[in-house]
Image (cartoon, coloured by chain):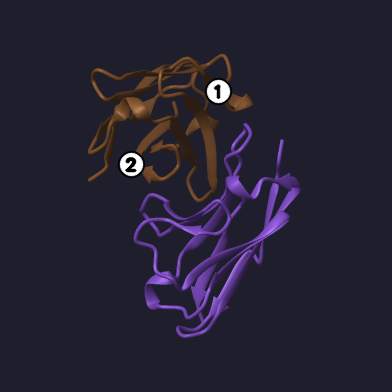
């Protein structure tokens, strides 16, 4: 079973700043099977990135994914007010399709 | 437009049963694998169950094996989750998801006496 550790737990930044969120896996993950989600309070998760690097439909290009093996990163180049939310990584290549515990991105 | 709408949630006593449904529209349902994912109050996301497009293959997180059953009706564009022997720790918002790219709005299941 692949276990994820996301860091930091909470990230406090201001609009316009760059955000870097980390996701570390307990064993190697296929890049083809790594996803990032955004979740706002009271809403369902929204797929941002799949295949570690590919933006989902309608996702702005300020969101980018990178990494391989056990270390993956979600970068938001310039934060907009609507980007403050909780972000989860997940692998969907082998069961169980575990999620990380999440990083809360809050306004500083 | 892809739409997934869950129903069937509510309050149930420990040991009880509940059947969740997910009505799909806006895509060819029979072409897609489906999943259930849950989120306990104030907690993170937990994958619960998977079913292949033809229902040949299913899978479950260990904590629900033997208690939950996933199924689908491709003629009715519907996904189901039969939940038996419910426990307090099953209390969560349950989401259906097309693979993991589109998600429903979620339905709350509360297990409490």
Give the SS element for disc 2.
Answer: loop
The image quadrant where one finds the C terminus of chain B is top left
Q: Give the left or right position of residue A23, taking residue B86 as reference.
A: right
Mark 2, Cα crowd under 10 Å, few <14 / some 14-19 / many 20+, is many
Q: Residue at x 70, y 44 (%)?
A: A3
Q: Colour of chain B?
A: brown
Same chain assignment for discs 2 and 1 = yes
Dots 2 and 1: beta carbons under 8 Å?
Answer: no
Where residue A44 appears, as percent x and y from the top left, is 38, 49
Determine if residue B22 is in view.
no
Q: Residue furthest right?
A: A27
Q: Chain of mark 1?
A: B
Residue located 55% across and 32% down the image: B89
Chain containing the residue with disc 2:
B
Q: Position of residue A34 (x, y in %)?
A: 59, 49
Which residue is the site of mark 2? B104
Using the image, tell me which numbered label, if any, was put on residue B59.
Answer: 1
Visible in this render: residue B26? yes
Q: Tell me, what hue is chain A?
A: purple
Badge 1 element: strand
| Residue A80 left/right relative to B63 | left
Earlier sequence position, callout 2 versus callout 1: 1
Left/right placement of residue B69 relative to residue A7 reads left
Does B57 sit above or below residue A60? above
Tell me what residue is drawn at x 53 percent, y 67 percent. Answer: A64
The image position of residue B38, as x and y in percent, is 47, 38
Label 2 vs label 1: CA separation? Answer: 20 Å
Does residue A76 sit above or below A41 in this rendering? below
Looking at the rendered structure, the number of numbered marks drawn on it comes to: 2
The answer to whether A62 is drawn above or below residue A37 in the figure is: below
Pick whichever, B39 or B24, lies toward us.
Answer: B24
């Amino acid at each position: 079973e692949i276990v994820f550790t996301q860091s930091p737990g909470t990230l406090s930044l201001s609009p316009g700043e760059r955000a870097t969120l980390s996701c570390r896996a307990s064993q190697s993950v296929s890049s083809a099977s790594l996803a990032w989600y955004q979740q706002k309070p009271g809403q369902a998760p929204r797929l941002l990135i799949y295949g570690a690097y590919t933006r989902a439909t309608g996702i702005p290009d300020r969101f980018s994914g990178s990494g391989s093996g056990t270390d993956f990163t979600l970068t938001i180049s310039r934060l907009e007010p609507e980007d403050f939310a909780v972000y989860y990584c997940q692998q969907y290549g082998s069961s169980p399709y575990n999620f990380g515990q999440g990083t809360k991105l809050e306004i500083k | 437009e892809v739409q997934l709408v869950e129903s069937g949630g509510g309050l149930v006593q420990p040991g009880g049963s509940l059947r969740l449904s997910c009505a799909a529209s806006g895509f060819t349902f029979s072409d897609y694998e489906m999943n259930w994912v849950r989120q306990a109050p104030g907690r993170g996301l937990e994958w619960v169950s998977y079913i292949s497009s033809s229902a040949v293959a299913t899978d479950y997180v260990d904590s629900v094996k033997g208690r939950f059953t996933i199924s689908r009706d491709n003629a009715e564009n519907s996904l189901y989750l039969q939940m038996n022997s419910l426990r307090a720790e099953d209390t969560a918002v349950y989401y259906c998801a097309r693979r993991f790219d589109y998600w429903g709005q979620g339905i709350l299941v509360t297990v409490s006496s």
